Image (tube, grey):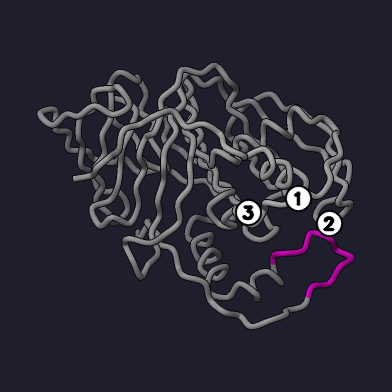
Amino acid sequence: MLGIKPCPSIKSKGYLTHLIVLFALSLWAICPQRLSAQTYLISTKSSHGSLFLGDNEQYSYRVLDKEFTRVTYKTFLSFEDSDEEGVEDIFILQIGEKISKFSSKIHYQMDSIKISAKGVSFGRIDGLHRIDPVFFYECYYTDLSTRELTFTNRLTQEDFKYNDAIPEIKWNVDYDSSRVICGFECHKAIGVFRGRTYEAWFTESIPSTAGPWKLGGLPGAILLAGDMENRCRFEAQSVEIKNDDILMAEYPYTKVSRKQYARLLQMRILKPTTFNVAHGNKNPNMKMTASGPDEPQRMITILESE
């Protein structure tokens, strides 16, 4: 049985500093072709010059849908060698009529700063060290009618993207089990997804099949979910009524399959120096060489074993 703490609204504390530095240093690619949307271009500048992609890089984005509900989750993904230690972050699920987007809260706020900046040049600001380099850039865009998903992430300085047809999860719904989460009555469901069994709590008060990560397909939005081995958790902290755009940024990306991406992520963790040399340079006139030992980091759990 999953536990959840009381769910006060999450307030941003000191994120602006971190967001600005990320704006100055980061660009990534997220551009699925099958989602139709209007595209906007905004010219941006960085006082860091051509450190990554250079000044006057076009920040483009697409409006995919209009969100009507936003769920903020405390998320956890364990390391392979422990079900108690892992990576934690705050993620936002934007739920629209057709599309849902699941991404880091700071990632979402950075997008907002880029859009509103419109060419402002930013100087050096400390704080980048607090951002996890793997988890932070992940974005999951789900077509709620077809359950087709587009995933994007940046590893080092290369942007990756894959499309994924999410198989139907055969949920066993237990309407006799109920609990209140963030003020909403929720019911329990058990389902198997790609080798793992998940317990989810959904509310029919939010009329959507959306959920965190790749989970969904229930007759209401999922507010709490986790696998039975405690490898991952998604705990709703707040639910808000919103009317903002669901955006997708567009940058150059490398298309891969889901399984190819999983292997790349493993290499990024097990051989970080080798991976950084191969994928850490966007300047064709600059040659990178390995420095330091190729010491592996702790491997995070790969949830999809099938």
Would you say residue 59 sits in the magenta stretch? no
Q: Amino acid at mark 3?
A: Arg
Q: Amino acid at mark 1?
A: Leu
Residue 110: give x, y in percent of width and height: 66, 38
100 lies above or below 54? above
State the residue position of label 2: 51
Is the residue under label 2 in contact with that under label 1 (CB below 8 Å)?
yes
State the SS at label 3. Answer: strand
* Nearest to the observer: residue 44 or residue 263: 44
Quarter of the figure that contains the N terminus: top left
Residue 288, picture quadrant: bottom right
Label drawn at residue 122? none
Nearer the N terminus, badge 3 or badge 1? Answer: 1
State the residue position of label 1: 25
Span shown in magenta: 279-288
Nearer the N terminus, badge 1 or badge 2? Answer: 1
**3 lies left or right of 257:** left
Camera-nearest label, 2 or 3: 2
Could you tell me which residue is drawn at 28 percent across and 51 percent down?
A: 227
Residue 229: give x, y in percent of width and height: 25, 57
Q: Amino acid at mark 2?
A: Leu
Of all residues shown, which one is farthest toward the left?
176
Could you tell me which residue is drawn at 48 percent across and 40 percent down?
A: 91
Disc 3 crowd rating (10 Å Cα; few below 14, some 14-19, many 20+) is many
Could you tell me which residue is drawn at 17 percent across and 33 percent down?
A: 173
State the residue position of label 3: 154
**157 lies left or right of 77:** right
